[in-house]
Image: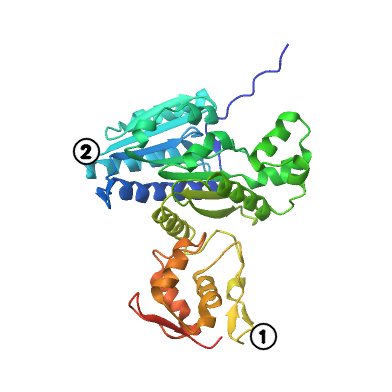
């Protein structure tokens, strides 16, 4: 007699960092959709005819928060947002595709979507393995006309690169949730062949090498390097951003990785992430140490503040700019902004006034015009 089937928890209880992830993705999709739908062509490129949003591991659409309140998950948030946006762009299309391996969760999501009576977007549902779903999805003709955003959000550190790589190399965006806490906890304990293969496929190396990577940060760097390799022959440059999510005790749980074929996507994702985190790069509790003053005895002797590489503030952006450009004496403001545009964490959009304000201790002149020069104090 076989083991009884484990009961599916259709509506799960989640921690605050998961709710924050839902909020971040919701706001990014909102602004991303407006940019894509508003693109009517330029420089020989045809305008967008619409958007395709794919969530291949969508869950039930509902969660219980830490106070047992029922809250919307990413799927419901995104569907509502897109349905509200589409009427502002007549003749543009909106396709939303949800998949989950649990029939109970897909049924729950469908019921909630049906209640909303969304009439401005086309919503499709599927139950099955998320990797098989995106491998078999036949939307190539639609993708020629529409911008695509794929959300790849597994419960564990499980990435099927054969399934996801085609989406990394198209005109569109991919958001990957890299569950680094799963690897840190589970790789060394994996004994079953299936579990070992999971980690080896995700990190593209043998299990012994994976176990030897003790740092969660280094585990995420390994994933970023794989993405770079998988996209090195893409027709256009790929831009990658990554933001860490911490629990209440400052444990790193996962990294949300964004891959875009357009620098505007990178700029937008960084702006939305910093806004979501309260004008910093994560919700890690730095216990006020970011305000701790230090003296740079080896450099220019300036009084500075402590930098935590897992949680940057705008003051850290200014410090980095000075380290990058200070020795040149002066540099055009446009060059500084271009540097920030391509930075994997630091935003340029949405923070230009704040950055200039934090730059003042490092400069004698901060111009208003992009083609004017920032003049630094002697480094």
Residue drawn at 41 percent across, 46 percent down: 26
Number of numbered callouts drawn: 2
Q: Is residue 55 left or right of residue 292?
A: left
Q: Is residue 210 visible?
A: yes
- Residue at numbered disc 1: 297
In the image, which disc is placed on residue 91? 2
The reply to whether callout 2 and callout 1 are in contact (CB within 8 Å) is: no
> Which image quadrant is residue 296 in?
bottom right
x, y percentage for residue 114? 35, 28
**Distance from Cα at disc 2 to Cα at disc 1:** 62 Å
Please say whether residue 107 is visible from this viewpoint. Answer: no
- Picture residue at 51% right of the left edge, 77% below the top: 325
Q: Which of 153 and 194 is in front in this view?
A: 194
Residue at the limit of the structure toward the left, as seen here: 90
Vertical comparison of 128 with 44: above or below: above
| Disc marking residue 32 | none
Decide: is 139 above or below 211.
above
Element on which disc 1 rests = loop
- Quarter that holds the C terminus: bottom right
């Amino acid at each position: 007699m076989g083991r009884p089937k484990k009961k599916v928890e259709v509506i799960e209880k989640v921690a605050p960092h998961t709710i924050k992830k839902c909020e971040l993705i919701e706001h990014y999709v909102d602004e991303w959709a407006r940019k894509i739908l508003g693109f009517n062509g330029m420089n020989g490129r045809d305008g967008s005819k619409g958007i395709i949003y794919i969530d291949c591991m969508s869950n039930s659409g509902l969660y219980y928060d830490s106070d047992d309140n029922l809250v919307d998950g990413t799927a419901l948030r995104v569907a509502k947002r897109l349905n509200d946006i589409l009427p502002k762009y007549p003749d543009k299309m909106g396709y939303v595709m949800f998949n989950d391996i649990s029939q109970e969760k897909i049924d729950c999501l469908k019921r909630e979507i049906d209640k909303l009576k969304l009439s401005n977007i086309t919503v499709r549902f599927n139950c099955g393995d998320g990797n098989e779903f995106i491998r078999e999805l036949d939307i190539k003709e639609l993708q020629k006309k529409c911008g695509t955003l794929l959300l790849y959000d597994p419960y564990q550190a499980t990435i099927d690169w054969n399934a996801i790589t085609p989406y990394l190399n198209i005109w569109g965006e991919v958001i990957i949730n890299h569950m680094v806490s799963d690897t840190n906890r589970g790789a060394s304990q994996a004994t079953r062949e299936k579990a070992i293969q999971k980690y080896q496929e995700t990190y593209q190396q043998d299990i012994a090498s994976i176990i030897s990577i003790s740092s969660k940060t280094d585990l995420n760097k390994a994933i970023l390097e794989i993405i770079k390799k998988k996209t090195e022959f893409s027709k256009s440059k790929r831009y990658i951003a990554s933001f860490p999510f911490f629990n209440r005790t400052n444990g790193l749980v996962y990294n949300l990785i964004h891959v875009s074929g357009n620098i505007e996507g990178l700029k937008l994702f960084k702006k939305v992430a910093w806004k979501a985190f309260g004008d910093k790069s994560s919700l890690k509790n730095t216990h006020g140490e970011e305000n701790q003053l230090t003296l740079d005895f080896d450099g220019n002797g300036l009084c500075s503040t402590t930098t935590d590489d897992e949680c940057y503030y705008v003051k850290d952006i200014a410090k980095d700019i000075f380290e990058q450009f200070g020795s040149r004496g002066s540099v055009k403001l446009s060059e500084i902004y271009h540097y920030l545009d391509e930075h994997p964490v630091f935003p340029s959009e949405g923070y230009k006034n704040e950055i200039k304000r934090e730059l003042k201790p490092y400069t004698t002149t901060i111009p208003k015009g992009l083609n004017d020069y920032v003049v630094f104090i002697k480094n």
